[in-house]
Amino acid sequence: MEIVAEKRTKSIAIIGNPNVGKSSIFNKLTGLNQKIGNYPGVTVDKSTGTIRKGTSTYELIDLPGTYSLYPNSEDEIIAYRVLTGMDTVKPDFVLVILDACNLERSLLLGSQVIDLGIPLAFLVNMKDLAEENGIQIRVMELYKELGVPLILTDGRKNEGMEAIRELIFKEEFEIASPFLAIREYMPDAMFTAIREKFNLSTDYEAFQRLVFSGYVDSAGQENKSWLQALASQFDFQIQQQQIKETNARYARINQLLKRTVKTEKRQENKLTSRLDGLLLHPVLGYFIFILVMLLVFQAIFAWASFPMDLIDGFFASVSSWVYDTLPAGVLTDLLAEGIIPGVGGVVIFIPQIALLFGFLAFLEDTGYLSRVVFLMDRLMRPFGLHGKSVVPLISGLACAIPGVMAARTIRNSKERLITILVTPWMSCSARLPVYIILIGLTVPDDLFFGINLQAIALLSMYLLGAFATFLGALALRFLLKTREKSYLLTDLPIYRWPRWKAVVLTMYSKSKIFVFEAGKVILAISIVLWVLASYGPPAKMDALEAQMAAELANAPEDEYTAIEERYASAELETSYIGILGKAIEPVIRPLGYDWKIGIALITSFAAREVFVGTIATIYSIGGDVDNELTIREKLSQEVNPATGEKVFNKATGFSLMVFYAFAMQCMSTLAVVYRETKSWKWPVIQTLAMTVIAYLAALFTYQIFS
Amino acid sequence: MVRTAASLQRGEQSVIAHIEDSPYSINFLEIGLLPGKQIRVIQRAPFGGPIAFLVDGHMMALRISEAELIQVQPINP
């Protein structure tokens, strides 16, 4: 009888401390595009890659950087879940990356992985730095003591990569004997009970199953209460035992290192000390930080505008090319008026997002971003935020989606939640086109004390966003309750020269996330919008069509365009979206908006930047595509048929800008907030609160200026 | 009188004697803040902000409230 074994790709998990160069090694091995970081918790999403040689293939899983396998943060919980096979199959092997300069700390994690009983190998990374620091590692002895294969590597250069490859393809991973006699730290009866219940193969797994019970069993309430009951039955204090376990591990590690590592007179990293004297300086440090931020702003606003104009022009010309070349019909209309501008509306933000994240990746890779946490923590604290909230908030200036995701590095759940909830108030790049068009309409292009008034208006909108962010955080600080205490305990990695390839990879991967996360929503919305704007209740639409045909039949040829445009406008009013716009008109009238702006509000509920596209659609559908007037000119000519006043006057324009500054008009952000908070509660509350505040603020603005 | 790491002057070299129990004892341990390690203040952020320490050659930042949990003693008592 022939047995066909199911062939499964074997998997190798890579784990290590933050800043140990783990992602760098992962990239070298897999060649996969992936982010490399120098800031705690950069690799949070589970990223995988494959390594191939001939017919054998292995899957590599890059786990988030952690100091230990204790449930301190999301990252550690993810690492634990993967290593113990809670979600998927257990990895077949583990590569633990150790820091040659700090073997003590990295062996804490390494020894925990040993005790889980998975076949593993150690990579001792940053050997170059260790040599500089006068640290000599006796690899053979360390191997004998630990019983784990050991390779010296330097992830920044290529050293040791061939050896790792060989180790992987020969599967020279070994199961080492337990590093710590964990039986001393928990009653035998408990080990037996837990191992039996969860069918675990090692004692340490049983110990960890209990330690993690409060975190991984939130769904399986039954397991959690079973484990808690067991703990209280034996009067077992989880935290105390964990501390004992850790101290015992360190004691053994230090004994071991005394025999295997020789440290000559320890030398300080001169460059890092000197730079820190400057960059962490109580005065100069902040001055430099402000300069760095100004450079970032310069990049996302000035440098990005050139490629953005090119993209804008490109999509406009593609649209009109499609219109002119393809046979007239519904499909061409959908393409030229719906899909192409929709795609363009997404692509146009790529330069800003890529530049911002290029800068952040650069700063992260050098080690500077961790210093920003140090500098900003005191400023953030009164607002219920953490030093680590700075990066999400800065990211929010380009796009809230990666900003909300970056909040994962914040360990305190209240501070993390506040950061997630207020980040969408930072003025993201999707608001910029809205502001620019409205400022162009309502603020004169004059100088005020030598400064352009329009520039002042734009700056004010950004300041308004930042002001709202901090005020919102302050309010949430008092509204939200927590028992957790906030703390800051963070590594400041040594300064290193950035790896440009890593920076470029980050720019690419962040832009990709944006295009896929935001892009699909924006694209879908622009198609729906086009359909809603092109169709209406058939009876009324048909009547209009017939009326137009009749009028056209009797009119001289040179009046055709005028008649068609008149009817296009009437058709829009009769279309489904026109009906929707009219329906909300009573609600938005106090803010100074008519039903056409109402349509734009409805559509940009999915994504702000759709505002410009919608306005363009509303005023161009059925109109002459070759019309020389730009959107701005069309809008400034728009008058209210009832009063004869301009629609986009100062009061309406300001009120709209304020509305866009405060309202949560971004489906993609909502989806990400849902994913990050794991409930609909927060995204729903966030949307309601932001919309109500936006409404009231816009109302207030309109009443002041009208 | 017991001194804590929060009271160290910039550049003053000392040794961690003991770390008081707190909800984040485990976090001190896992980052490598252990009794017996040399500790020195590199920089203090203004207005009572975090303190940057050099602990056995590794830089780390702590708030004052955390630094107060670290008891220190002179390097050669």
Image (tube, rainbow, N blue to C red):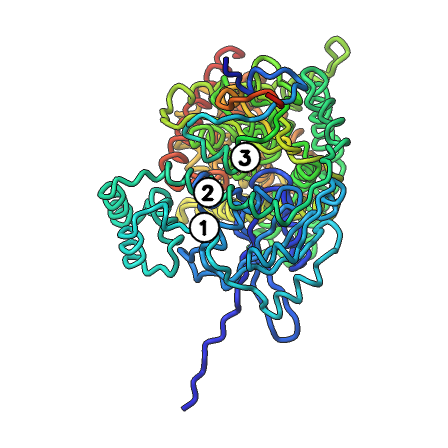
Of all residues shown, which one is farthest toward the front?
B77
Residue lying at 47% horizontally and 22% vertically, measured from the top left: A384
Say what secondary structure mark 2 lies in. Answer: helix
Whether residues under marks 1 and 2 lie with C-beta atoms below 8 angstroms apart, the answer is yes
Instruction: Determine the chain carrying the residue at label 3.
Output: A
Q: Amino acid at mark 1?
A: Leu
Distance from disc 3 to disc 1, alpha carbons, whole Å, reads 56 Å
Task: Using the rendered image, report if marks 1 and 2 lie on a common chain.
Answer: yes
**Residue sitting nearer the eye, A678 or A56:** A56
Distance from disc 3 to disc 2, alpha carbons, whole Å, reads 56 Å
Q: Position of residue A271 (x, y in %)?
A: 77, 32
Sequence-first tag of 3 and 1:
1
Number of the front mark, 3 or 1: 1
Instruction: Determine the chain carrying the residue at label 2.
Output: A
Q: Amino acid at mark 2?
A: Ala
Quadrant of the image for the N terminus of chain A? Answer: bottom left
Q: Residues within 10 Å of mark 1 (few under 14, many from 20)?
A: some
Q: Quarter of the image holding residue A214?
A: top left
Q: How many marks?
A: 3
**Residue sitting nearer the eye, A309 or A536:** A309
Q: Position of residue A261 (x, y in %)?
A: 65, 47
Q: Which residue is mark 2?
A: A248
Say what secondary structure mark 3 lies in. Answer: loop
